[in-house]
Amino acid sequence: MPPPPPPPQLPTPPAAEAGWQVVGDKKKGKKAAKKAKEQERQHQFRARKIAARLRAPKTAAVVITLQPDAEKKGVTYRDLLAKAKEAVDLGELGITGGLRLKVTQTGARMLEIPGESSGATADALAAKLRASLNADEARVSRPVRCADLRIMGLDDSVSEEELVAAVARSGGCTTDQIRSGAIRPDQRGMHAATVCCPVTAAKTIVEGRRLLVGWVSAQVKLLEPRPLRCYRCLVGHHVSVKCASEVDRSGLCFRCCQPGHISATCCATPHCDACAATGKPADHWAGSRACVSPAKAKAAGRGRPSSAATASMATAASATAAAAAVTVAAAAAATPTPAEGRPVEEAEMECL
């Protein structure tokens, strides 16, 4: 007899073929997702902040500054503007909507031309004003909104002229609109420099993230705006024209507050003479953000009280409330009650 056929084999379950699966820690997954979300939020915040700082200006400006010698002779801004209106016809320049007049921090008169593409018109207006106004009486300038860039990773042979030419070529501006600081070695042995250029050029360079200077593709970093600083007392948040300090530090180094040299050639430890005079920590540059925090200065400028003033007001309010409570209690104790034969309304009127 032939052997019986083998029994049919049942199919293997899919779970058995797949093998064991390790279930991850849900808490770790949530923490990683939360951390990634926070990093993405911070990245978007920094991107929006940089975009706001590199936004192209919507106006072009021409500034008329009265010379100090002319001011001593009795010349005023009224005389300058009257002479300018007689000599310059805005219609010939294509300005039909008028100008916006502002007064700068130094007291100069700023003429604003609306429109993002009004730079050429402002240049023509500045040329007309220079031709019509006496140079001994007024100085006409064309200020442009600028930004500071830190160029890092330069080689030893790069010069300031070569760096300025690279910024002008990449940013699409002229070399006379760019100011370059000294090229110095950093902690890594590489060389770096700070460059000030128009906002439009800075935006183009920052978006490219790299700047080709000679053979090297240098790293670019957008710096924070410099705080306002008085060059007379070296204290921030005002200018020398509005300085009320009795101390004149205009001849001192910004870095160490010692006479005889400038900060560009100073290698001494930073020291702020203004903060040292008031007993505050002075291990920083004069007029830097370490002197007074921007938030406190902004609050003081808006008239808002500081945290110490707020605490003092709260303490005074508590003391006033306690004194009022004692007064009310004493008045209530001295007030006759209805049991003494008088109605409540009469007793309340006596208290009033």
Image (spheres, helix red, strand yellow):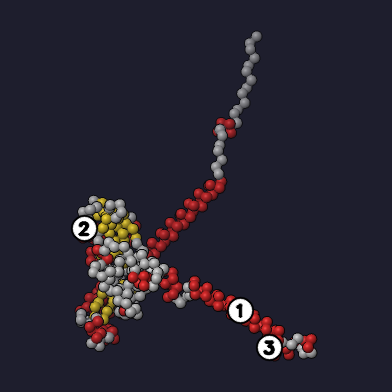
Q: CA distance from mark 1 to mark 2?
A: 69 Å
Q: Amino acid at mark 2?
A: Ser
Q: Secondary structure at mark 1?
A: helix
Q: Is residue 36 above or below residue 223?
A: above
Q: Amino acid at mark 1?
A: Ala
Q: Is residue 127 left or right of residue 347?
A: left
Residue 197 in view in this figure:
no
Residue placed under numbered mark 1 in the picture: 321
Residue placed under numbered mark 3 in the picture: 351
Residue placed under numbered mark 2 in the picture: 159
Q: Amino acid at mark 3?
A: Cys
Residue at image x 40%, y 69%? 280
Q: Is residue 273 left or right of residue 311?
A: left
**Residue 150 at what x, y percent from top left?**
31, 59
Binning the other alpha carbons within 10 Å of mark 3 as few (below 14), some (14 to 19) or many (20 upward) gives few
Q: CA distance from mark 2 to mark 3?
A: 86 Å
Looking at the image, tell me whether mark 2 or mark 3 is earlier in sequence order: 2
In the image, 92 versus 68, the foreground residue is 68
